[in-house]
Image (cartoon, rainbow, N blue to C red):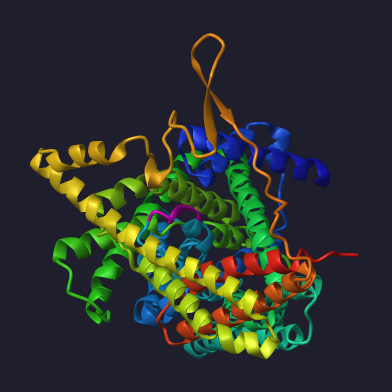
Amino acid sequence: MEGLEVTVLIGLTILVGALIAPRVRLALPLVLVILGLLLGFVPQLREIQLPPETVLLLFLPVMLFWESLTTSLRSIRRDFRYILPMSTVLVVASAFAVAGVGLLFGMPWETALILGAAVAPPDATAVAALGRLLPRRMFMKLKAESLTNDGTALVLYAIAVSLALGGNITPLSVTMSVLTSYIGGIAAGAVIAALGYLLLRRTSSTVVINVTLLLVPFSAFLLAEIVHASGVLAVVVAGLIVAYVSPRVTTASSRRQADAAWPFGVFLLNGALFVLIGLEVQFVAHEISAAAIGRLVLITLGVWATLLVVRYLFQLMNMPFQRRTGPRPSKGARARSMAVSTVAGMRGAVSLAIALSVPAASATEGEIAGRNEIVFVTAGVILLSLLVQGPLLPAIVRWARFPVDHAEDEEYELAERAISGAALAALDDLATEHGIGQEIRDKVRAEGYQMLEFSNARALAREQEIVDAEARALDQLLDEPDPLGATGSESTGGELGIGGVPARGAPSADTDTVAAPDGGDVEVRTLQMIATSADVDVMQRSPLLRHEEHTRLKLALLDRKREVLLGLRRSGTVDDLVVRRISARLDLEQVRLQGIEEYD
């Protein structure tokens, strides 16, 4: 099939999947994989093949860069002692355990090790797509682990391919490969991020800023490949650095554009990848003899089960080395937490990319035996991850009975009140600096107090909701309804709805009741003139001047809020993701004040 036909077909499949997934109550990745499997029954469609480099060089940099931009640096620092062994030692242990399973089923050692390297790392995009039900801290730990373990898997893959091609592997060469991969990848990512920072500081054009951000992941991957380092790690490091410095070197307009474009692009790439996984399974299944498929299905099941067991046992052995910041959980709570983390460790894009890249890596020096077996088992493990672990994860999370974590909401409310209070405290100084009249000062001060009151009211409402939820849970436990709840609601309801809004059927202040010709009453809504007033002072200052002063003062207050917000992030008081949420709201307010930038 032609490239345009393939593009339209995959796009339509993603569209159909997005329409079906909410109706069947399945995660979109699962639906897309199933649709890909169904499409694979058409002989012409299962011939659709991506070049192996496409997944590694086009899909991964974009997806990993976006996941890095939306990862909490504070979480990485706090849980580093968990993330480091899970992204290195666990990957090695999983790869060799899978290689052992392959040997038991008659695979050559080198082929089994390549398979182990392919399926060892959990995937960041799969975790992001299916792990939103997890508690925030566990989700961030899994996401950070998945972002960094790909470098370890690719080093193992390179070693396994060298063994398969008859290369001479020594402990010294392995050590040098690991050091070059990690140190070189970190250095390449830092260098590209620094160059991007220098460029972004010198421009305020939305187009230039976002083109620069688009080039960062590809440039980092390319530089790492040139020095034979980990391109995945380079992209992750560059993304984390850019996420930290972005608020100071980008504009509100460019951030709003990026926040709209990047998630959509990543959504399309993810969707295409899951469809291609289904097609790839069909392609390989038709390439392998029927007699061998039964053996490969057994290998797939064995490998999948081995990955789950190894992950759970490794967490169990790693538990004594973890730093505890709160009260020690019970053994049952720890076991449930490890079970959830085990089920949430799903495979995806990186595993498929490694499996598909086997012939490309060996094209100049000979064919590696068992390529189709590697692709079949890898795709099967990905399918089992998505089709079994994905639907099972919500039930496991409910079974684990994690306590509700309100830390993010509390930090959000704290930050909102802190920046609003700081802006009000600095209002007079900023007004004097910008030459703002008293009328505009009073107006903006009133708006600021309204915003502060709203933040306080929202915090109180959330706390009351927690209390009410606990009361409802207690009522259900005792099987006794609250007698005061019903009478209280009846006595205060009247004709008012929620929040004092007139209930349906109650006449509003702007409604008059007149007698109808048939003797009944008819409600007549009166028109109110908003744009005219008898008290307009024609000698007052120009409305244009007042608007310009109001805009300047509001922009100055927004800058002050951002300064305080970034200070809260530096001190560790507020998480990076909370800062990102509030920054998005401030950016929207600034774009509303300044207007949308026009492009030539």
In the drawing, does residue 593 fall left or right of residue 472?
A: right
The quarter of the picture where the C terminus appears is bottom right
Residue 587 located within the stretch drawn in magenta: no
The image position of residue 313, as x and y in percent, is: 27, 66
Q: Between residues 273 and 400, which one lies in front from this camera angle?
A: 400
- For the stretch drawn in magenta, the main secondary structure is loop
Work out which residue is located at the far right of the displayed protein and give it.
600
| Location of residue 336 with respect to 5 vertically, above or below | below
- The quarter of the image holding the N terminus is top right
Spot occupied by residue 3 in the image (x, y as percentages of width and height): 81, 47
Image position, residue 529 (x, y; %):
68, 45
- Note whether residue 180 is visible: no
Determine the residue located farthest toward the top in the rendered image.
Answer: 518
The number of discs equals 0
| x 59%, y 33%: residue | 38
Q: Nearer the viewer, residue 557 or 98?
A: 557
Give above or below for 277 relative to 432.
Answer: above
User: Which stretch is magenta?
Assistant: 129-133
Q: Position of residue 556 (x, y in %)?
A: 64, 81
In the displayed structure image, the side of residue 421 where residue 213 appears, left or right? right
> For the point 73% across and 35% down, which residue is it?
44
Image point 40% across, 64% down: which residue? 139
For residue 540, which quarter of the picture?
bottom right
The residue furthest front is: 534
Give the image quarter of residue 101: bottom left
* Left or right: 430, with 144 as reference point: right
Q: Nearer the viewer, residue 372 or 519?
A: 519
Res 189 → quadrant: bottom right
**Res 148 visible:** yes
Is residue 48 shown above or below 356?
Answer: above
The residue lying at 46 percent from left, 67 percent from top is 143
User: Between residues 439 and 254, which one lies in front from this camera angle?
Assistant: 439
